[in-house]
Image (cartoon, grey):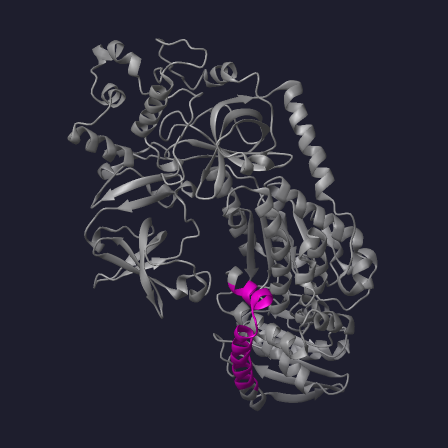
Amino acid sequence: MGSCIICGVDVDGGGRICDPHQEDVVFDFRGNSPDQLVSDRFYRGVVDGYAEFGVFVDLAPGVTGLLHRSELDRRLDSLDWEPGDEVVVQVKGVRDNGNIDLAWSIRQADREFRGVLVQDGDTEHLPDEEDEEGEEDDGEADAESVAKNDAEPDAEADAEPVESDVSDDEPADESDDDTPEFDEVDETGEADAGADEANEAGETAEADEAGETGETVETTESDASETAADDLDDDRERVGIGTLADAVGDAVRIDGEVVSVRQTGGPTVFEVRDETGVVDVAAFVEPGVRAYPDVEVGDAVRIDGEVESHRGDVQVESEALVLLEGEEAETVRRRLAEALTAEARPEGLQPLAGDEAVAELADGLLDAAEAIRRAVLESRPIVVRHPATADGYVAGAAVERAVLPLIREEHAKSDAEYHYFTRRPLDDPVYGMDAATNDATRMLQDRDRHDEQLPLFLLVGTGSTVESADGIDLLSVYGVDAVVVDAEVADPETRDAVDTLVSPEIDGVDADLSTGALVASLASAVNDEVRADLRHLPAVSYWAETPDRYVELARDAGYDAERVAELREAVALEAYYQSYQDKRELVADLLFEDGGNLAAHVSEQFREKLETEVNTATENVVTEAVDGVEFAVLDTDGYTHRYDFPPTPLLLDDLHRRNANGEAYATVGIGTDELYVRTNADVSVRDVAERAAELAPNADVATAGLREGKIEFLSGERDAVEDAVVAAVAEAF
């Protein structure tokens, strides 16, 4: 029976990873049959070539899988993999005919996993176990390997001068850019590196920096901090983390706060930040063993180490790490606090197109911008929630455009933007318990498994009505910060439920704003350097009656009315498909990078699909007049393609815009247990639902989405609800 390399529990069958940690490890497959692959595991592979429908990846000689284009988080032709590139993919499954279905992996480096294993057919082992066996077979094992692997217990005293245990003052990895990253380093490799260094310096690997040769250095977890403190170089001066990119190969000292701790199959990796940036610090005791167990997230530390570069990422190999206390710890935290205060608060708000309504919301928007910038500086993940609509995607993409460069500047890791910023579109118009449960589950897993901080939640175009109260309350139980930005009037009950609320009602503003327009100005406050990229976004977010100031702003940015319409329609179509995914690269291509062909192509599909649906719906609309109000009622179950584009709300919006005549006009789309209302008058859907509940008391009528005009009810009372809603709308005119 083997033990899990992550948590140490016993694993049946001699495996080396338990079921809960299967996805925390990347495997090097050495088998010869697809049947030996394990579904849901992540494997290294080599790009074999491209086809129209995806990428072929070799997992081993003769074992090739297909990464279908539908599994990618970007367009196939935007993938920068070349044949021969080493990549990481996930095995979805193996078919009866031996075909291997692969899935995309956002993690493409060993250090992003908590361990590395070799799967040799049906057996598993650590890479260092394979290396040790190979060295013994070749008769090339050095003295340190022999001392570790071959010495009998009664011979340990004789083997002490070449003990392979690595002290905390010894660098975890002296490899160059071409060697495996620190996750892959094994015990024998560490010993070899230490022996080579010692030979070059004319002393044994166990000699300490004071020159006390002949004494074996054995560092236990309990005295690691004391040993490290003794090994600090008193002559070394502190440098800022932001300068480390220019100090590769130098011995440095940094003071900072621990942001996260993750245990890999090799060293323990501490993510440390100071007032200038963030960097990974690798500390090694032995493979998979937690170094400095007393150091946790939030602690102030001092580190002496050497700056190294691995595949473009800067990291520090720790020689000594000390937990700071008292005045020294307070000094570190004071520097961080002062830097955060100085950097996080924008100097002011300059609304796009000089929108006076947005200017009236300046205080709230600056508070929101400060919260976002502070999260970046604190290395706290940011999760953006927005509706899966064109307006919602424009708002989410605006924030994304502003925040990603800040994350790249703050973090040395090249892939930090994928770890510290997540955009999760919402199928439903409210931030309900389903979305909140998903978010809470993810953030708690990241906290417990990867020692990540709890994120900042930014809800744009959602979260400001009482229908979102339960979801927001769930987040508040864990004390996470929530910022809500909505162009619609917020319910008074939500004011105290979130940390920051930006809504027209808060400042007494009465304006026809879109969420995309409001959030685009917020994004410019977060990062003024991307302001020019955002100028056309407000116009894209309006389906009708776009304010002239935004039309002119888009035109000045090179986007005429036709081009803006193409972008809006293309985003709306892509928002519908795979609506739960952010489609980061695809949306960026549409809104910021596209020269015209992509948006034009997608918008053409939008128009064809919408026109077909509108024609079908128009033929089946039932019209009636009630108390002077003309109603157009559509059975959305019977006369729409319910599982294809366009979604019902978008279809009804278009129908209503085309057919509404005069002020007393309403469009109603009714399905099995949900109903949508569109009116020409300022009619409250919540009031309509309350009145309909009185008229149809057995139908359990309730507002499901104030912004979308959505009402839910019991399907068995559908006819009664239709009559009740029509009557309630007529009364409201």
In the rendered image, residue 615, in percent from the top left (x then y), is placed at 56, 88
Give the mark count: 0
Q: Among all residues in the image, which is located at the extreme bottom?
A: 619
Q: Is residue 147 magenta?
A: no
Task: Identify which residue is drawn at 62% across, 75% down.
Answer: 721
Of residues 48 and 609, which is closer to you in this image? 48
Q: Report if residue 606 lies within the magenta region.
A: yes
Q: Return the x and y of residue 535 as percentages of the image width and height.
A: 70, 65
- Locate residue 528 relative to residue 294 in the image: left or right: right
Quarter where residue 50 is shown: bottom left
Highlighted magenta segment, given as a residue range:
586-614
Residue at the spot 38% in from the left edge and 33% down from the top edge: 175
| Figure quadrant of the N terminus | top left
Q: Quadrant of residue 540?
A: bottom right
In the displayed structure, does residue 470 sit left or right of residue 46?
right
Between 677 and 603, the one nearer to me in the picture? 603
Front-lying residue, 685 or 597 = 597
